[in-house]
């Protein structure tokens, strides 16, 4: 359906949308058209404008936008020292020195990297949890 705004601009409003709104909300055709115009920012609704102004005045929108940025940021984890794994990684690295080249401890409780016969390797030490029973 073609609709002419007060500014003279002609827009096309989908008939099925108007019919759907009339049926769902039990409103007249004119009310459905006005609703569609408000929803698609062709006109402004005074009530919505007033509520938006109140929300901005009370900093509600700023709080909503800030909520996504502050609470969902990852916090830096503090890992407990694990002397058993540190000693084991050190032991493995020292023993690899005899067989491999460029032995590097990338993470003192977890990863050793080295080269052997032209290939690069990475050992990742993982402690398994005790099974729950």
Image (cartoon, rainbow, N blue to C red):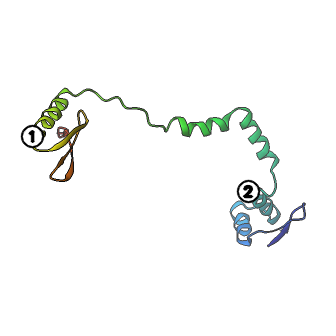
Q: Is 88 rendered above or below residue 2? A: above
Q: Which residue is mark 2?
A: 39
Place of residue 124 in the rendered image (x, y in percent of width and height, measured from the top left): 22, 43
Q: Quadrant of the C terminus?
A: top left
Taking the spot 80% from the left edge, 58% from the top edge, the residue there is: 42
Q: How many marks?
A: 2
Q: How far is the residue under mark 1 from the one under mark 2?
A: 73 Å
User: Is residue 125 shown to the viewer in this render?
Assistant: no
The vertical placement of 82 against 13, above or below, is: above
Q: Quadrant of residue 61?
A: top right
Q: Determine if residue 7 is in view.
A: yes
**Position in image of residue 2 (x %, y %):** 82, 72
Q: Secondary structure at mark 1?
A: loop
Horizontal arrangement in the rendering, residue 3 relative to residue 20 (left or right) = right
Residue 8: give x, y in percent of width and height: 90, 64
| 51 with respect to 117 (left or right) | right
Which residue corresponds to mark 1? 98
| Image x and y of residue 77, in percent | 37, 32
């Amino acid at each position: 359906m073609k609709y002419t705004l007060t500014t003279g601009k002609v827009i096309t409003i989908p008939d099925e949308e108007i019919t759907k709104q009339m049926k769902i909300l039990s409103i007249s055709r004119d009310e459905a058209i006005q609703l569609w115009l408000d929803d698609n920012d062709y006109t402004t609704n005074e009530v919505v404008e007033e509520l938006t102004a109140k929300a901005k005045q009370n900093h509600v929108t700023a709080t909503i936008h800030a909520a996504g940025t502050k609470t969902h940021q990852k916090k830096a984890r503090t890992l407990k020292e694990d002397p058993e794994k540190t000693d084991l990684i050190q032991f493995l690295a020292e023993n690899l020195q005899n067989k491999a080249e460029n032995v590097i401890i990338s993470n003192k409780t977890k990863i050793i990297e080295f080269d052997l016969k032209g290939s690069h390797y990475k050992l990742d030490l993982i402690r398994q949890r005790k099974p729950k029973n």
